[in-house]
Image (cartoon, rainbow, N blue to C red):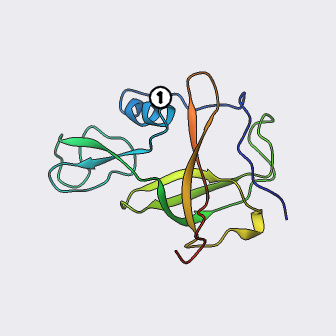
Amino acid sequence: MTSLLAQQPGTPTPQPGRLSQPYWDGCREGELRFQRCDVCGTIPARPSAICPHCHSRALGWERSAGAGSLYSWTIVWRPQHPAFVVPYAPAIVELDEGAFLMSAMIGCEDTDLAAGMRVEVEFHPASDTITLPYFRPSAGGAGS
């Protein structure tokens, strides 16, 4: 068993683009955001200028409550960059609002992870300009 922790500042960080900037601005403000089509309600898999379902350009940003369930994960022991501290657990979280988000798990042992586990967001600065959303088990556990 090994505790999963947030990476320390100084690890490689994402480079926000024109479409993803509202997401990163939200993270820096402690707010998890996702896009939704104002016409058909589709949630794109990544920030987009056009809805992948109805092709509308009417995509808005919504605030998530930051809660969901663990959909998938892996444990990394051999990082792609030496600055990353292992182990870490990249994860896909299904937010209660229906969006899927790639993040990482923290605040538990690697052996505690289970599909469907209830999780909640926690923000950690990665640099002066980037704050990353991590997820930890929610206080209610797997069944809440």
- In the rendered view, does 131 fall on the left or right side of 10? left
Instruction: Name the outermost residue toward the right.
Output: 1
Mark 1 burial class by Cα count in 10 Å: few <14, some 14-19, many 20+: some
Residue 116, quarter of picture: bottom right
- In the rendered view, does 117 fall on the left or right side of 21? right
| Relative image position of residue 43 (x, y in whole percent) | 31, 54
**Residue at mark 1:** 16
From this view, report whether residue 47 is shown above or below residue 39.
Answer: above
| Relative image position of residue 143 (x, y in whole percent) | 55, 78
| Relative image position of residue 91 (x, y in whole percent) | 60, 57
What quarter of the picture does the N terminus occupy?
A: bottom right
Tally of marks? 1
- In the rendered view, does 46 fall on the left or right side of 3? left
Q: Residue at x 44, y 41 (%)?
A: 31
Q: Residue at x 33, y 51 (%)?
A: 44
Q: Residue at x 47, y 53 (%)?
A: 66
Amino acid under label 1?
Pro
| Relative image position of residue 141 (x, y in whole percent) | 61, 71
Front residue of this view, candidates 105 and 31 = 31
Front residue of this view, candidates 96 and 138 = 138
Instruction: Name the outermost residue toward the bottom.
Output: 143
Instruction: Name the outermost residue toward the front.
Output: 139
Q: Residue at x 73, y 59 (%)?
A: 75
Label 1 sits on a secondary structure element that is loop
From this view, report whether residue 138 is shown above or below residue 13.
Answer: below
From this view, report whether residue 135 is shown above or below residue 131.
Answer: below
- In the rendered view, does 67 fall on the left or right side of 34? right
